[in-house]
Amino acid sequence: MKALIVAASLLLSFSAFAGTSPKAGDKSAVVCATDDAQTCVQLQFLADVNSSSESSFIVNIATANNAEIYNLKVDLWMKMGSHGHGSAPVEIENTSANVAKITNAWFVMSGPWLIRVDFDLNGQHQHLEIPVYVAQ
């Protein structure tokens, strides 16, 4: 089962760099913590992603024994060689345990972006990055 999840994640992650943006209903690759394969994040896009309109998505965080996360932060980051830049702060609405709706997400230019998800779990800070390609 774990091999199937890894294979599906790799397949989905290729779409992040294929030059097409996620569409409403698409899901991102599953990204897991390097030190804890049971702590994973997946996004579900609620609107088409582009560089000219607001995006929104759901953040789903899976943890061992469904342990609750705290201090969720989400931001958008574009790597540009040796430097990068972010976007305006997103709005986070916690909808249930370990699930949040993200709105006011603006990808201000086309290209490869990272959706950075930070939270605390069992006294440990977690930082996971989900790659997303944004077309015009």
Image (cartoon, rainbow, N blue to C red):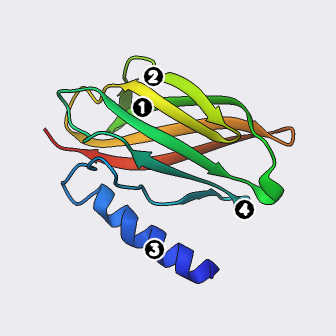
Circle nearer the viewer, 1 or 4: 4
- Where residue 38 is drawn, which disc sits there? 4
Quadrant in the picture for residue 110: top left
Indicate the secondary structure of the residue bearing disc 3: helix
Which of pointers 4 and 3 lies earlier in the amino acid sequence?
A: 3
> Do residues under tags 1 and 4 come within 8 Å of each other at their CB atoms?
no
Q: What's under tag 3, amino acid-wise?
A: Ala
Instruction: Locate the N terminus by quadrant.
Output: bottom right
Which of pointers 1 and 4 lies earlier in the amino acid sequence?
A: 4
- Where residue 76 is drawn, which disc sits there? 1
Spatial CA span between label 1 and label 4 = 24 Å
Farthest-out residue, front: 95
Spatial CA span between label 4 and label 3 = 16 Å
Residue density around tag 1, few if under 14, some if 14–19, many if 20 or more, within 10 Å:
many
Q: Residue at x 21, y 37 (%)?
A: 50
Whether residue 21 sits left or right of residue 29 in the image: it is: left
Q: Residue at x 54, y 25 (%)?
A: 92
- Where residue 8 is drawn, which disc sits there? 3
Q: What's under tag 4, amino acid-wise?
A: Gln
Spatial CA span between label 2 and label 1 = 8 Å
Residue density around tag 2, few if under 14, some if 14–19, many if 20 or more, within 10 Å:
some
> Do residues under tags 4 and 2 come within 8 Å of each other at their CB atoms?
no
Q: Position of residue 75 (x, y in %)?
A: 48, 29
Residue, disc 2:
90
Spatial CA span between label 1 and label 3 = 24 Å
Q: What's under tag 2, amino acid-wise?
A: Val
> Do residues under tags 1 and 3 come within 8 Å of each other at their CB atoms?
no
Spatial CA span between label 2 and label 3 = 28 Å
Indicate the secondary structure of the residue bearing disc 2: loop
Whether residue 88 sits left or right of residue 36 in the image: it is: left
Indicate the secondary structure of the residue bearing disc 1: strand
